[in-house]
Image: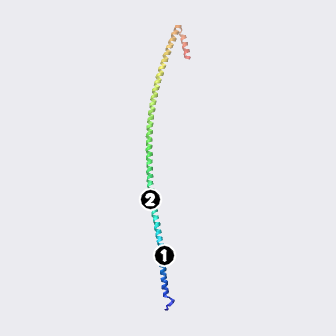
Amino acid sequence: MNIPLNIDWQQILLHLFNFVILTAGLYVLLYQPVKDFMKKRETYYQGLSDAAQGELEKAQQLRKSCDEKWNAAEEEIRQRKAAAALEMEQEKRQNLEETKEQCESLLCQARENADMEKKRILESAREEAALLAVSALEKLSTSAKEGSLEAFLEEAERGSRA
C-alpha cells in the first residue's frame, strides 16, 4: 500500500481511537466529578444564600416590628406625659383653691380674734377709765374736804407725770 504523502490510515485510526479513549476516560474520570463537585458547591452556596436572604428578611421584619413597638411606646409615653401634666395642673389648681380657702379662713379667724381683742382692750380701757374716774372723785372729795381745789389739781398733775 502506497499512500501518497506517506499517510498511514491505520496509524491515523489508531491515533483517533486513542484520542476517543483518552477523551472518554478524561470525561469520566475528570470532567464528570468536577462537574458534580461544582454543582454540589453551587447548590450549597445557593442554600447559604437563600438562608442568609431568609434571615435578612426576618431581621428586616423584626426591625420593622421593633420600630412599630418603639413608635407605639413613644406615643404612649407622650400621652402619659400629657395626662400627667394635665393631672398635675388640676392638682395645682385644687391645691391653690384649698390654700386660698385656708387663707380666707385664717384671715376671718384673725379678724374675729382682732375684734375680740379690740373689745377686750376697750372693755379694759373702760374699766380703767372708770377706776381712774372713781379715784379722781375720791381725791376730789378728799381735797374738797381738805379744802383746796388747787391741791387737787397739783396732785392730779403729779399722778399724770408718774
Q: Does 68 sit left or right of 152 as displayed?
A: left
Q: Give the crowd class for mark 1: few <14, some 14-19, many >=20 residues within 10 Å.
A: few
The amino acid marked with disc number 1 is: Leu
Q: Residue furthest bottom?
A: 2
Compared with 60, 117 (above or below) is: above
Residue positioned 48% across, 17% down in the render = 127
Looking at the rendered image, the quarter that the C terminus falls into is top right
The amino acid marked with disc number 2 is: Lys
- The percent coordinates of residue 74 (x first, y second) are 45, 50
- The colour scheme used to paint the residues is rainbow
Residue positioned 44% across, 50% down in the render = 73
- The percent coordinates of residue 113 (x first, y second) are 46, 26
Residue corresponding to mark 1: 29
* Element assignment for label 2: helix
Residue corresponding to mark 2: 58
- The percent coordinates of residue 156 (x first, y second) are 54, 14
Compared with 60, 135 (above or below) is: above
